[in-house]
Amino acid sequence: MTEAVTVTRDGDIAIVTLDNPPVNALSLHLRKPLHEALMALRDDEAVRGLVLACAGRTFVSGADITEFGTPKALERPSLPDLIAALESFSKPTVAAIHGTALGGGLELAMGCHFRVADAGARFGLPEVKLGLLPGAGGTQRLPRLIGPMQALTLIVSGNPIGSGDALAAGLVEAVHDEALLANAVAFARAKADKGAALVPVSRREDKLAEAKNDLGGFDAAVAALLKKKRGLDAPARCAQSVRNGLVMPFEEALATERQYFVELVQGEQSRAQRHLFFAEREAAKVDGVGKDVAPRAVKRVGVIGAGTMGGGIAMSFLNGGVPVTILEVNREALDRGIATIAKNYDISVKRGSLTEGARDKRLGLLTGTTDYADLAECDLIIEAVFEEMAIKKEVFAKIEAVARPGTVLASNTSYLDIDEIAASTGRPQDVVGLHFFSPANIMRLLEIVRGGKTAPDVLATALSLARRIGKVPVVVGVCHGFVGNRMLAARSAELEDLLLEGAAPQQVDKVFTDFGWPMGPFAMGDLAGLDIGWRNRKALGKTAAIADALCEQGRFGQKTGKGFYVYEAGSRTPTPDTEVDTLITEKAGERGIERRDIAGDEITERTLYPMINEGAKILQEGIAARASDIDIVWVNGYGFPIGKGGPMYWAESEGLAKIVERLEFWHARTGKEVFKPAALLKEAAASGISLAALRKGKAA
Ligand code: 3H9
């Protein structure tokens, strides 16, 4: 093992190099020698300046998250100790940044007098994504470097910025295309030669002046920023802490920041969000797809179908810089699809989230065709045509006729049997499901459906492509609806009966939004369009008393101004409708159901508990390899509140024994299959072992 910290000299400039793979996190075994090295160099008169650099692929990417909640996190020297040591230098200190300077890494860099960076470096304070705030001065020093409002925007979003933006903002002093270390040393030497007074970042006040004089303006901007972060503790704490820096002396604001950090790190939300951080990385590890399995090269993707789904999928690839050939059955449909893609990009340009140059570049990667022969040059072809097995098979036959050997053949089906599709081709090993979620260009989740014969390198290709286009992939097995939609069906099974038995749509939706979902199921139905489910039900010979009756009255949801709710012209705000109440009462009467008051707990038990139960069945069957994979599906594809860590994580905190008991109660009362507790759930509840632990090592 190499030393975590090494000190070398370039003449009178000391270079301290940190080496703690994979991401140079600030673990205790690095903090200790770093602190010692800093104290020695500070007092070494032969040293006139210091450069802080990192070995490996990146600068420090933060505190060591695995230490949180363990004694190591509390052991000194702490990160604030290291930063205090840096700030006590009376000779120039320079951070040389390549890769990512994130969280505690950026805080460490801000402890230096100066920062120079590689052109490809990225900078951010992503703590908020872990349910935290920067706890080592980030909320105090960043505003002093780039101004409070810009700092807060960065801190609350958690998203990184590149070197160009960092330079423009004043976060770094210089950016170099090459020879970062040599340039950093030269920078330190030049500063030492100049002998100008060195002011630590914590003592710089000029960038704070404007906001200090206009606290009202600052508060209004903060309120706007926090609007989308309701229900989460960390963003509000971030804002409060930056504000403290405007009204408190530095030391007091710093101590308060630390106190907020300690509170948040012990809280449920941060625990849940840290679980999701590691869960996302775990999901990328797939049985039988080790590092030795090389993905196939994908230089061009073919997309069949230019409707809403196909267009969104095409945009996902274009956004990731992957050239796309999109196919439609005729010229009109193709032109319409391409025009919609262009329009969507134009909207982004208008909103300021995309430059005209980037839009043109993306559209430049898009080719349209009505001829399957043009797909021959594609390395992966994905179909997004009508959800019917016969049609899918027909399309796959056409694809197979033109695709080169080794081309990955993918289906975007959200329910159908991938094995049946694969068996209809002569190359089932090349077939995989790539289930995108609507709107496909926005939603981060990608369910990768592994068929019985899908080759490991096809899975590796899907995983690497997902990463290239910024999706969060989860590999799942074949079953009706896979992980997400199968659990959604279980979550929805009781909705109609809840209404018939006495609940109102707005009451059910409130239970959901109080839980932290962005929307309740009825408001969601209105948004998506009730006619879609109606059409599907008719095709399957199924009925839904209330939803069918609404559709028969032309109430399709937001698009017709009426659904489970009523919408004023141009408004997306749902207003409860007495006509719907009457309809529900009528339908209940027809069925001889006596309506009663339904408590919030009952709504939870009859919607979320069956969903957990289905998740346990999915685990039991090996459709998902880990409980945490299910959490990733639900957080990234269905809006499950991140502060609760995903359904299976939440179930453990709710109590598996309680869930089993209530499921058994409802099963005894109704006889419905959705309530019959899964064997795995019962086993976990009885043994006190978590679902995750029970399933470990049993992945399909
Ligand atoms: C913080 O700094 C708090 C302070 O404000 C205050 C303290 C007092 N710790 O993502 P990858 C592991 S909070 C421990 O696949 P990439 C990761 O689990 C922190 N482990 O690579 C994975 O392990 P494995 C603020 C970490 O190249 C491996 O490294 N910082 C940490 O796609 C590779 O990770 C952040 O939130 C960590 N901090 O992306 C940054 N980071 O191989 C979090 C990573 O066993 N990190 N690991 O699965 C990231 O965003 C990405 O990892 C990064 C690299 C962009 C750095």
Image: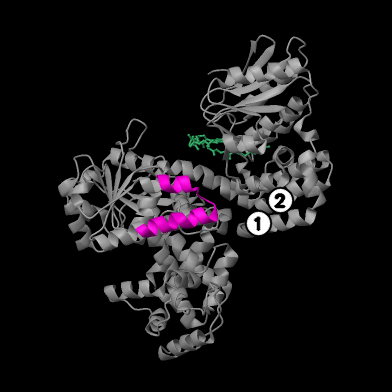
Q: Residue at point 33% right, 40% down?
A: 461
Q: Main secondary structure of the magenta part?
A: helix
* Picture residue at 75% right of the left edge, 43% below the top: 257
* Structural crowding at the residue carrying mark 1, measured as other residues with C-alpha within 10 Å and reported as few (<14), some (14–19) or many (≥20): some
* Viewer-proximal residue among 74 and 694: 74
- Picture coordinates of residue 116 (x, y %)? 63, 27
Q: Name the side, left or right, on which 149 lies relative to 18.
A: right
Q: Which residues are magenta?
A: 339-361
Instruction: Say left or right for 194 vs 409.
Output: right
Residue 61 visible to the viewer: yes
Label 2 CA crowd tier, 10 Å (few <14, some 14–19, many 20+)? many
Residue hosting label 1:
226
Does mark 2's beta carbon lie closer than 8 Å to ligand 1?
no
* Label annotation for residue 141: none
Residue 485 percent location from the top left of the image: 38, 61
Location of residue 104 (image quadrant): top right
Left or right side of 622 for 355: right
Residue drawn at (80%, 38%) of the image? 205
In this rendering, the answer to whether 165 lies above or below 3 is: below
Residue 665 position (above or below residue 477) = below
The secondary structure type at the circle numbered 1 is helix
> Ligand 1 is in which quadrant of the figure?
top right
- Label placed on residue 239: 2
- The answer to whether any part of residue 123 appears in the image is no
> Is label 2 in a helix, a strand or a loop?
helix
Mark 2 / mark 1, whichever is N-terminal: 1
- Residue 310: x, y in percent? 33, 56
Is residue 368 shown above or below 194? below
Residue kind at label 1, given as amino acid type: Leu
Amino acid carrying mark 2 in the image: Ala
Labelled pair 2, 1 in contact (Cβ < 8 Å) = yes
